[in-house]
Amino acid sequence: MATLAPPGNVKAKFVTSNTNSEQLATALRPWRRRLALQQALSWTGRGIISGLILACLLLLVSRLTPWVTAPRWAIGIGIACSLFAFSAAIWYRPSLARAARLVDARLSLHDRMSTAWEMRKETAPLYGLQREDALKQLSQHVPSTAISVRPRRSSLVTSGIVVVALALLVLLPNPMTAVLQQQAAFQVRIAKQIVAIEHLRTSLAHLTNTSAQQRAQIDQILRDLETKLQNAHNETEPQQAIAEAQARLNQLRDPQANNQAQAHANASSSLESSSNASLSAVGQALATNDSKRLSNALQNLASQVSHMTPAQRAQLAQQMENAANQANQNPKLRAALHQLAKAIADGSPSEIADATNALEIAASQDATAQAQANSIDQATQSLQQAATTLA
């Protein structure tokens, strides 16, 4: 049985077809590289120009409104636009098919290269001849000559104008510089006052003679003030924040604190003027809010009363009663002094002990109230000093 062998010309057609296809790809690659280079340079140049234009706009805005970070944004946007344009040019670089179409357009080959590339797999003799013709036409041109990578004159003019504008915006004095300097100085003053308030919070937190509740309230007021100072944008806002904090501190005051403190001082002065050493010591202890010294003075007074005659006790009780009258605006202290005066007049040791305990409790409460008032005064004075400094 005979076997039919393909004619030799058919094999030649396949070889010619494959050879022409490989030659076509090899011939297009230099043109593709040249087109990719042109695209990268063109797009990157446009990206640089766009970045410079945006930088000019940002610097122009910084001349109309205070914007301290405008130069950084201008530099960042300029670099970002350039990198984005370069990356896009590399990512969208032309393929061989697109390179064939672009070469046809640039060299006026009337779609010879794009047709040859699309029909590169065809084996018919007509397509082989078409590819040979396309390669022949392409060989008459050189990529470096046919495709220029020099920038256009319009691009150079635009670049020059933008560079000059950018240079003027950078070199000419910015009218907002003085405003920015004032804002910077303002922020420095704010920062110093925040540090001072923080020290005040620390010192007030360590006061043991005030109640924990009041310390927490004062601390919260100062914390809120620090937050408002940090968020202040002009000279008025800090003053308003400090005034509000002072008002909140004043609300913590006992409305009768001043009257009670004055009554406490009057009673102490009355006892200090006594000719009796023990009674004078009680007055001095009350004046200094010294609880230990007061306890010792009252013990000495109680032991002394037990050796007095009724007339002497009556005289001592009268002096104690006079001190109680001086403490008229301090009900607790007045009641304790009156109770002690009665106990001294009666000469009852148990009543004297109860009365001295009541007096110590009243004195301790007065000392706590005075300490609380002093802490509020300290905070208020510090805030007033801060307001003065900021003004």
Image (tube, rainbow, N blue to C red):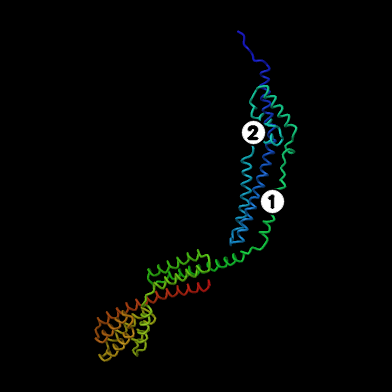
Closer-to-camera residue (360/144) = 144
Q: Earlier in the sequence, mark 2 or mark 1?
A: 2
Report helix, strand or loop for mark 1: helix
- What residue would you read off at disc 1? 159
Q: Answer above or below: position of 173 versus 54.
A: below
In the rendered image, is residue 279 in sight?
yes
Q: Which residue is mark 2?
A: 97
Position of 198 with respect to 133 (left or right) is left
**Does 106 sit left or right of 331 as displayed?**
right
Q: Amino acid at mark 2?
A: Ala
Quadrant housing the N terminus: top right
Residue type (three-letter) at the residue carrying disc 1: Ser
Q: Which element type, helix, strand or loop, lies under badge 2?
A: helix
Asked if residue 191 can be seen in this view, the reply is no
- Above or below: residue 233 compared with residue 353: above
> What is the x, y in percent for residue 382?
48, 73
Q: Position of residue 350 (x, y in %)?
A: 24, 81
Picture residue at 64% right of the left edge, 39% below the top: 93
Q: Of 31 and 353, which appears nearest the observer?
A: 31
Q: Which mark is residue 99?
A: none
Label 2 with label 1: CB-CB less than 8 Å: no
* Whole-number angstrom distance, CA of label 2 to CA of label 1: 33 Å
Residue 105: give x, y in percent of width and height. 69, 36
Residue at the image position 47 percent from the left and 75 percent from the top? 381
